[in-house]
Structures are given as structure tokens and as C-alpha cells.
Amino acid sequence: MTKLTVTVITYNEGPHIVEALQSVSWADEIILVDSHSTDDTVERARPYVSRIDARDWAGYGTQKNHAQDLASNDWILSIDADERVTPALADEIKGVLRAGPGASGYKICRVSNYLGQWIRSTDWYPDYHIRLYDRRAARWSEHTVHESIGCRGRVEKLRGELLHYPYRNVSQHLAKIDRYTTLVAEQWSAEGRRSAAWQALIYPRLAFLRNYILRGGFRDGAAGLLVSKLNSYYVFLKYVKLFEMQRLARAPEATKQAAATGIRPPTG
């Protein structure tokens, strides 16, 4: 049977980490890379893992590449601390490893729980990602956010689902939207992308229609409506923040300083 290493990256994931690790306790090895958590993440994780490596935060993809580099086995299952491998998915993965993997990577569908409800609509579902893979043929992109795996060779899909608990409440959701949209805008700016004011007006509306109507958010009731609205808000903030970066890059030095300090420069 092909041996498997599970990799997890963490920072202050105390409330989540034990259930995540228990869901993969059947793996041959579990590697945890922690970015100097200030809560009890490491202490709670220690009984369940083969190795803990403390490392300064270097971006999602970079941390995950580091974790797979530490593995003793070539086959990797990468999960996040807010995810759970179901027994059905675990059995399916074991079957693939027992028979000998016929592909270089396997996509797993993630289903998210929001406001106590499983969301099977909007941009959130189906949400397929390569999570089971041969590290000799795969590497994580090193984008600051929304990292993904580039995999050489055939990629197949598994039937089982990965359970995702992304937010404890709406406040945490909004805080994450703010943080992620800043990272996206910074990445876009570094890549030379541009934003116009009209995009912040049009694209969020299109995003809401896509989420709520075309991708069936209405079927999930109030939770589907809220997810659709917040997904469109996410789009709005990406373009607004990129637009702001462009404006500040062209602004006089005094205006830049004012934006940084919140103090309005003298006029006249």
C-alpha cells in the first residue's frame, strides 16, 4: 500500500486543529507547519502529529511547499485546519493508495458549512481542489492568496467530500474578506493589473447574479442570500482596493502621507 503523509499549515487554529487531525489519524504520517501561533494550537496538535515545524509566515503556497518537503512519503494529502476528512472520503483515499494511484493528483470537492447549514450552491459549491497528489509531480503556486497546485500528468476526481468550516460567524467572515481582498489587490498590483471605477460598480452586481441566480444561491434560503451578497462584496473590495493603490501611486507625497496617517494635509 502506498504510504501517505498529511500536511497541515497553522496559525492560531486552536479551536479547529484537534478535529482536523483526528479526521486523518489513519495516515502514515502527519506534518504540521506552524507560523508561531500565540494560542494553544501546537499543544493541542502535538499528540496527533509526527512532526511540528515552526516557521515564519511566508505565504500560503510557500508554507505548503515547505510542509510537503518535510514529508517522508511522496504521496501527500494537504488539508487546512478548518477542514475535516469524512470517513467515506478516508475509505476512498485508502482504496486509491491500496490499489496504487493511477493518476498524479486527485481533486476533492469541498463543501462549506455556513450559519449551521451546508451550502451546496453559489461560487462555494462544487469547490474542487487537488488535495491528494504525488509531490514528485506537483507543486503549490506561491501566490500570496488563493494558492493552487500545478500538477504534471493525469488528474482525477474523487467522489468523497471534504467538510469545510470557514467562519465561526459573520464578523470573522467580514474580517477575512478584508484581509484577503487586500492580498489580492496587492498581488494584482504587482502583476501590473489595473482597475477602473466602473468595475467596482458593475462586477459586484454580476457576481451577485451569478451566485444567487445562476449558481442557485436562492435554493439555500437566507444563508444562500448572505453568501451571495458577501461574495459580491468581496469582488467590490478587490477592485476598490486596487483602484486606491493606483490613485495613491500617482498622488503627491503629501497626499500619500495623509492617507497613511489619517491627517489631512494643509491646503492654500
Image (cartoon, helix red, strand yellow):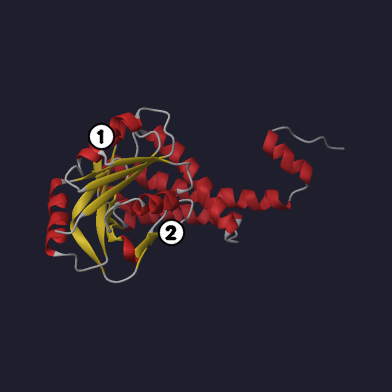
Question: On the image, numbered disc 1 is attached to which residue?
Answer: 18
Image position, residue 126 (x, y; %) = 27, 56
Residue at figure coordinates x 68%, y 38% from the top left: 260
Whether residue 212 appears in this view of the structure is: no
* SS at mark 2 in the image: loop
Outermost residue, front side = 72
Whether residue 245 appears in this view of the structure is: yes
Pointer 1: residues within 10 angstroms few (<14), some, or many (20+)?
some
Residue type at the position of mark 1: Val
Residue at figure coordinates x 38%, y 34% from the top left: 170
Residue type at the position of mark 2: Ser
Outermost residue, right side = 268
Quarter occupied by residue 214:
bottom left
Residue at figure coordinates x 53%, y 46% from the top left: 182
Q: Which circle marks residue 141 in the picture?
A: 2
Q: Is 119 situated above or below 3? A: above
In screen coordinates, is 182 left or right of 133? right
In screen coordinates, is 168 left or right of 183? left
Image position, residue 79 (x, y; %) = 29, 48
- In terms of depth relative to the viewer, which is nearer, 88 or 215? 88
Q: Which circle marks residue 185 in the picture?
A: none
* SS at mark 1 in the image: helix
Mark found first going from the N terminus, 1 or 2: 1
Q: Which quarter of the figure is the C terminus placed in? A: top right
Pointer 2: residues within 10 angstroms few (<14), some, or many (20+)?
some
